[in-house]
Amino acid sequence: MILAPVRARIQGGSCPLTFRVRIWIRGFAVGASPARPLPGLHPHPNPYPPPLTPPGLIPAAAPDFEDAVNHRQQGPPEEKADSSNYFLVRAHCVYPCRCPPEPPACRPGVALVRDGCGCCLQCAGQRGDPCDGARLCDEASGVVCQYVGDAPTGTCRVS
C-alpha cells in the first residue's frame, strides 16, 4: 500500500528508491529496523518500582528495618548483621491486605501514614508511643522509632 504511490511517481518501475523502500519495510517487519528500540533500552523509564521480594526469598543486601526507619546508610556487608531481621520484622504482614473500610480519625496534627506492611492507613506514632514493624512513627515531624538492643518493639523519639 505504501509502495503504490512511490511507483506512481517514479517512471520506470525498478528504481533504487523503490528497492530501498521495499528493503526497509521487510526489515521493519522482521524486527531488523533500527527504528525499533532494543530490549531494555526503552526511551521512557518505567514509572513503577520493581515488585517487592516475597517473604522467604532474602536478597543478599536487604536493609534492616531500623535502618529504613531511621534513614541510616548501610555500612560494608561485613559490618552488617544478619539480613534475616528484615523479614522477621515483616513476619506479621499478611497479603492480600485486609484494611478497615474507613481510615482512622487521628488527633489534630497527627499524620495519617501507611503501616509497616504498606497496606493500611494508621495514625503515625508520636513521641513516647510504642512502635515496631507495623506501627510507625511520624517521621515527617522528626519522630523516629528507636529500638533498645534486640527488642522487637521500640519507642517513638525525636531524632
Image (cartoon, rainbow, N blue to C red):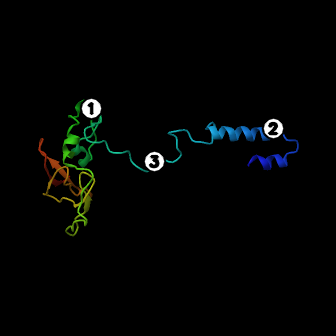
Kind of residue at badge 3: Asn
Which of disc 1 and disc 2 is earlier in sequence? 2
Which of disc 3 and disc 1 is earlier in sequence? 3
**Residue 16's mark?**
2
Q: Tag count in the figure?
A: 3
Kind of residue at badge 2: Pro
Q: Residue at x 19, y 48 (%)?
A: 92
Q: Residue at x 83, y 39 (%)?
A: 15
- SS at mark 3? loop
Which of disc 3 and disc 2 is earlier in sequence? 2
Residue in front for this viewpoint, 112 or 54: 54
**Residue 46's mark?**
3
Residue in front for this viewpoint, 145 or 83: 83
According to the picture, the residue beneath numbered tag 1 turns out to be 77
Q: Residue at x 13, y 50 (%)?
A: 154
Residue that lies at the very extreme toward the top in this rendered image: 78
